[in-house]
């Protein structure tokens, strides 16, 4: 058995959900939780939770925003091809299950997902909570992606990882370069460190590569 561990936002999708939220409900730079996270003042989870808590949406607005993230239209076929080729797909995301699970279900994709649960509040906000019962719990990101990859390596013959952000760096470095897929910030950081990786534009491209291995 082989396992592909994948990030979600900006990896399976064209846009990060939280970035769309920040554009729709902008804050002054000094009040922006994402800037506070990059400054090391709060955790990744705290930043996203505060961004989502600041939403004041109308009925249906967040559903439309989730669709606007641009999930790879070929994800369903790609996941099936991976399964047929002996690959299990595991999603490990520091984002929120409210939109992740919705998008995957709408695409007809059934895979294991480790992420932060969430629900819509009375003011149209997205209330994201820590996944305390998850096997790979982290108090800084919600999900410890490094632990997800380590667990996969104990169970599988080959493990691949794909991501694009800061929480993806450690797990990406754990897998062999030929099974390490990256773009965005992660690709830039790996290049700066002199680490090899496989670049990609669309997630479904990775399925094509892995099923040929």
Image: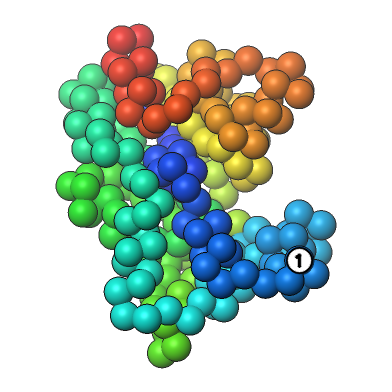
> As displayed, is residue 121 above or below residue 83?
below
- Look at mark 1 in the image and give the residue it sits on: 29
Q: Is residue 99 visible?
A: no
Q: Residue at x 60, y 42 (%)?
A: 165
Locate residue 28: give its quadrant: bottom right
Q: Position of residue 60 (x, y in %)?
A: 30, 74
Q: Residue at x 35, y 17 (%)?
A: 210
Q: Position of residue 207 (x, y in %)?
A: 32, 23
| Secondary-structure class at tag 1 | helix
Q: Position of residue 26 (x, y in %)?
A: 62, 69
Q: Residue at x 54, y 28 (%)?
A: 182
Task: Judge from the rendering whether residue 115 lies leftward or rightward of residue 190; answer left or right.
Answer: left
Locate residue 186: give its quadrant: top right
> As displayed, is residue 178 above or below residue 90?
above
**Residue most extreme to the top:** 213
Q: Residues within 10 Å of mark 1 (few under 14, many from 20)?
A: few
């Amino acid at each position: 058995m082989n396992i592909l561990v994948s990030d979600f936002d900006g990896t399976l999708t064209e846009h990060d959900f939280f970035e769309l939220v920040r554009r729709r409900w902008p804050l002054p730079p000094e009040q922006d939780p994402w800037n506070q996270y990059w400054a090391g003042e709060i955790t990744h989870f705290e930043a996203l939770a505060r961004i989502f808590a600041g939403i004041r949406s109308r009925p249906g607005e967040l559903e439309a925003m989730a669709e606007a993230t641009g999930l790879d239209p070929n994800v369903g076929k790609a996941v099936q091809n991976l399964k047929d080729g002996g690959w299990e797909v595991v999603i490990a995301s520091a984002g929120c299950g409210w939109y992740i699970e919705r998008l995957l279900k709408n695409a007809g994709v059934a895979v294991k997902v480790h992420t932060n649960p969430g629900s819509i509040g009375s003011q149209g906000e997205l209330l994201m909570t820590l996944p305390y019962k998850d096997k790979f719990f982290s108090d800084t990101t919600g999900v410890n992606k490094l632990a997800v990859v380590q667990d996969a390596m104990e169970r599988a013959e080959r493990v691949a990882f794909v991501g694009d952000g800061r929480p993806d760096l450690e797990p990406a470095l754990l897998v062999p370069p030929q099974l390490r897929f990256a773009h965005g910030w992660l690709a830039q950081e790996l290049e700066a460190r002199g680490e090899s990786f496989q670049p990609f534009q669309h997630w479904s491209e990775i399925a094509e590569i892995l099923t040929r291995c």
